[in-house]
Structures are given as structure tokens and as C-alpha cells.
Image: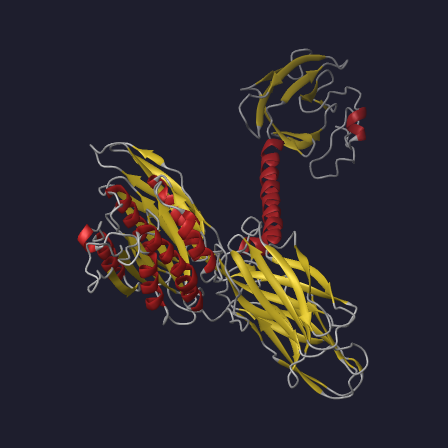
Amino acid sequence: MLTSLVAVGAGAGPASAAGRPRSDPGPTGSAAGLAPANIVIAVDESGSITPDKMAQEKAAATSILYDEFNQQSSVEVIGFGGRDEYESATNPQAPTICPMTPLSTPVQRGSVATCVSGLARRSDQEGNNTDFNAVLDQAVTDLRNAPASYQRLVFLLTDGVMQVYNPNAGSDDATRLARAILTNQTIPDALAAHVSIWGLGFGTDAKLDDLTPMAQHSYQDQCAANRAQLVPDVSETRTTLLAQFFASARCAVFKNGNLVPLSSGSTVDVPVDIPVIATSGAIEVLTGDPQDKVVFEDPHQNPVPTTDTVGATHYELEGSGGVIQTLQITNPPPGTWHVVISAPAGSPVQSVAADVLWQGRLTSDIVVDGDAVPGQPVAVDVELIASRDGALTADALKDVKVVAGMSGTGFDPVSTPLQADSGRPGLYHGSITVPPSATGGLTLTGLVTGPGVAAQQNVSYPQLRVPGAGSVNANFIIGSTTVHPGDDFTVMLQLENQSGRAHTVTVELQDAQPGVTLRQPTVSLSSDSGVRPPVPLTIHVDRAVRPGRISGALTATDTDTKQQYTSRFLPVDIVPPPSFVQKYGLWLALGLGLLVAVVFAVAWAIRSRLRGGDVRDITMTLFDRYGDIYEQLPAPSVPATRFPFGLVGVGDEGQGRLVRVGGVQWVARRRRNGLMVSSEGRDPAVLYVGDRIALSEDINLGYEDRRVRQDRTGLLDRLLGGRDPGTAADPGEDPQTPEVV
């Protein structure tokens, strides 16, 4: 397995094969992990330049200056013309130069911008021809000694074609001679010095005859192929320059924003998108009035500072107060940004736009599963990992292609495409067959390509290894697929020793995010043959680690020989710890349900008890000797547990009456499923529907209950445990024991 950095942009080149652990933040600056550049911007000041063209050349130069990401880069600006008949042959006019200036501070960028503003059309006496050789010779000389790791770029901005003066030749002959020098000397010199030339022609007079050879035959570095472009309409400078030139030359991705109308006193919101793989971004805003107010808002629509560091994100505004403003962002939060532009009252209708450039850095791992055996396939997995917080998405990688290649002795190189994992963005699978004729060491290559993506990683096998006799076989067994911050999880290492020798196996967790650590780095393997019991390996996840997929892979390697036995990605997700409710939610729900049930039961019992004693449904009734009703008294309609009533005229045949007040006082109360009646001088008795109390030979006391269906025969009451009609129970006795009154 091997790790490398993948530069993401408009065509990134081979990444370092040495790699870097993810815990190392890498180079500092606006484009951490990407090469800085020494840039020469050559601006045509010849006599054919009109004021409009000069303004556009200055705008283009300023855009390059402000859009450069890396604070370690430097920029030089040369204003060029060319000798003519008015110029002294012994004292040629030197080009105007803004010296090579580092871009590490806003002040330094501002000084170059000030120099750009001083560019102007040359007069006849200043040498106003167009001599590409002279300016390119100067640029190559100034770039030749740039550090080897730096890009060396020339952006040539012109409105015309080669036009020079030679006192020893006519005009046409002089130009032909100059073009021959350009082809045979100037461009080869640039190629030898690793200088890439990009040509941009303004207006209808510009021709590709000179610009295209410069681009095609100068040095082709790790980004997109050099090219030349004509801009017939100078109003298209913004789009063409940024999209086709600077972004491509600097391995950046450019997203062109549409022009939006802005009227007097109004405000527009222009959205721009920055993906999760971007580690550097530049939002460029073009307005029609320096008085326009520009506010940059992050994906949460919070205004961001123009010069400050907030957490891991650094902001730097270039060109503040001008019609071109660029917000440089290191580690930009991914998502949709908003540029809010407001026009002052009284300003004319104008068109505004916001473009975005971004560069990204990915960590890439390659895992080879199995032994390199001639004639047999080798499983290859490649995983791309975001170098910052945030998970890769299928949309961000939709155009990325990964190819596995193999080279070595005894065969011609072979390759095969890998397929994206449908469930895990950034993971690619496949296999490549070792040619049967392979006789020696192998180099396995993973090539990652796509719009703005290119990287190459190598896994080298010093010799072919045949599994089985005399070998050590290993395999990682991964059980758990989730872990909480602050917890551990276990991976089992299965080892089989058939070599007859003792080994020490080094286990590494490579390219995992900071805070994810392996606690047992080495495993001792005795010389005994056979399969060993699985060895548990503990991986700890710190509490501060953010949720997401654990990146990187486990490898098992012989400590002495460095032979890799096995490697595997970790399909383990870090998930937020469960909340109190999530952890105990079931028990809380059960407890709450039980509590509610108890409260309900108690409330129901109280209600039932209260309602069970309510006598409003009772009607006291007097029956004659034949069982016919001749007098009734319903209980009051207000809730009550006692029903007092009186009896008058009892003993007088047919004269008994029920009254509320007066007579012999009685009280009725509910008792279980019956009615207890009591009176002074008489023992309490329990009646059931259908029961009677004999008050005299001709009068019996009973009751009706609207809660109970009336059954004059007493059958229902007897089935429910009641009593036979004409009997009553003593309140202290079992209701099933009859007592005839």
C-alpha cells in the first residue's frame, strides 16, 4: 500500500510517491500541498494598443495577480514593445518591469497592482513595435533560477502579431527572421528552462500564428496542456482568462458566474459553490462601480471577515474598493457561498458577476490484496480521502477515473480500469493479472484522472512471491462497522507461518485522521508452522474526532524484510455517541408508559370509586303487596354519595309515601354492586336490583338503578352474584348469604 497527495484542479500532475501522513498539515500558504509558482505577466504596450485594450490587459494582469492561491508564489510584470526606426541602435529601450515580488502579504500584492496600473501605450520614440523574442528572453532569464519545485509560467497578453525593426532588413524580412528566432531559439530556451508559455490575444488584430507555437512547444508541466486563445471581444476577457488560462495553468477548477443586472439602490445575491475537496478557493467579484458594497457569506449565510483566520479557515481580500475584488480562502467551508452586492443610490444600471476558482488536495491510498503470482490476478483497491473535514460525495467525484497499471521485467506494461464503489464514494475496486512472463520486480501504479484531477501512486514489489510453502500469510478480520468518539474497537489479525522461521510483524494504520490510533504496533510470530489464533488489535478513537468514515488502511509488514503481508481499508464509521434519550430511550419509554398506566389506573380507580358511589342514578321505589309500583322518588341530580329520603304513612294500607324531608329518615348508599339502606332503629341492609325490604304487610321498599338493566325476576342479578327477590343481605355478610327480612 502507498500513500500520496493528489492535487485537484484543472489538471494536476504526478503526485509525490513518498507520501505524507494525514497528521502532517503539509506546506503552509494559500495552496497547502500544491506547488507555488513564479509567474511573469507580459503585457503588450505597442503602438496598436487602444485605451480599451490596455484597460482589459490591465484587468487580466490584475486577475492573475489576485487569483494566485499560493502565498509562496511570486509575480513579475513586464510591459513590452519593440525597437523601431526612431530608437537608437546603441541604446534600445528596455522593457518596463515590475520586479519579481512575493505574494505573501496583501501589501506585496498591492505593490504589484500599483505597478500594473502604470502600464501604458508606448510612443514611437519608446519603441512601440511588438517583439515577442525580447520579452520572452527577459521572462525566461528571470524564471530560470526559480526553485525546482515551482511552476514557471509566462502569460503573454497582446493585441497583435510579431512586428520588429531591423535596420539591415526590410519589414517583412525582419519579421520572418524574428519568427525563425522565436521557433529555433526562444521557445527551445523556454522548454529547456521548464518555462510554460500561455498566450492570450485581444481584439480582431491578434493572430494565433505566433501565439500557438509558443504555447505548444514550450514546457508542458503537470497541469493542462499549454494553449493560446483569441478574445475578439474584449468584454469576454474575464471569462476567457480565468476559465481557459489561469485556472488551467495552475491546476485550478473554474466556475464561471453569470452576469446579473444591478440597478440603483438595489441588492443582489450571487451564489457560488465550493466542493468538499477544495482546500483553497478564490471568489472573484466584478462590479461596475467601485462604490458598490460587497459582502461575502459562508454556506451558513454568515458574513465572513475580509482579513482574518477563523478556526482552520483564513480569509484575505484583494482589490478592496475596486471593480475587481477577490476573496482568497484557505480551507473554505464547502457548500454554496453567497456574494451580496449592493449598489448606491443614484448609480446607473450595471452588470455584476461572481466567479470561483478552487484547488483541492486529496490523500490517496492503494491496497493490494493477495500475492503477485505470474498468471494470477491481483486485487487492487484505491481510496481517495478528503484532506480536510467533510466526506467525499459521489457528485464531487462523478467524473473521476481510476486506472491500475503494472510494469516490470519480462513483459510490456498492462493496465485495467477500476470501478467506483456504489456505496462508498472515493473507493475504487478492480484486479490486474500478473503477466505469465513476469520474471522480476513489479511496480503497480494507480492513476487517478478527471477534470482537475491527476495523480499517480506506485506500489513496488522487489520480487515475486509465491504463496504457500515458505511464506507468511496474513488477513485482517474486521467485525464492528461503527465506533463512537472516545471508544475502542477491535480488529483481529489472522497469521499463518509456513516459513519455518520466527518473524516480527509490524502493523500500521496509515493515513487515518488525527486522533485515530493503533495501540499494538508489533506482533511476534513464532517459528511454529500452522495457523495462529487471531491476534486482537485495538484501535482507539479520541473524543475530539469528528464523525465520519475512518480513512486510511491497516497494513501488516515484516519488520525486518519490509515484505508486506496484507493490507485492508477500514470500513468503519465514526458515529456520534448516543444521547441519553437514544441510549435509554426504550427503558424511558417503558418506564414512562408504566408511570402513565399507573397514574391512569389510579385516576380511573379514584374516578370509578367516586363515580361508583354516586347515587344520581338511583330511584327509591315502593311496591304494593302484588309487586306493583305505586310510589317512586329519584335521587337529586347533583353528584352525591348519600341519598337521604323519608317514609311517611307506613302501616296505613296504601298510604306509604316517599318524601325528601320528613317522616322516618332513611339513607341509601352504594355498596359494591348493590345498595345499602339504613334507618334509625333498623339494621342496615344491602339490596340488589329486584330485592325488597318488607316495611309492612302491604308495602315493600326497593329501588331501580339506571346503571343496571332492570330484571324484575332477579335472574340477571343472581347470575351476577345478586340475591333472590324479596331478600336482602346484611352489610357485614357475604352478599351470597341470603337473609329474609
Q: Is residue 649 visible?
A: no
- Give x and y (percent) for residue 656: 65, 14
Q: Is residue 462 left or right of residue 241?
A: right
In which image quadrant can residue 457 be found?
Answer: bottom right
Seen from the viewer's position, the closer of residues 440 and 423 is: 440
Which quadrant would the C terminus be assigned to in this image? Answer: top right
Q: Is residue 131 left or right of residue 569?
A: left
Q: Residue at x 31, y 60 (%)?
A: 135
331, above or below 148, in the image? above
Count up the numbered dots.
Answer: 0
- Give x and y (percent) for residue 419: 67, 55
- Give x and y (percent) for residue 181: 38, 61
79, above or below 19, in the image? above
Q: Is residue 381 left or right of residue 112?
A: right
Seen from the viewer's position, the closer of residues 4 and 335 is: 4
Which quadrant would the N terminus be assigned to in this image? Answer: bottom right
Q: Residue at x 61, y 79 (%)?
A: 520
In which image quadrant can residue 134 be found?
Answer: bottom left
**Scheme by which the image is coloured:** secondary structure
Seen from the viewer's position, the closer of residues 87 and 79 is: 87
Seen from the viewer's position, the closer of residues 246 and 327 is: 246
Q: Is residue 62 left or right of residue 274?
A: left
Q: Residue at x 75, y 39 (%)?
A: 734
Q: Is residue 103 visible?
A: yes
- Give x and y (percent) for residue 458: 61, 70
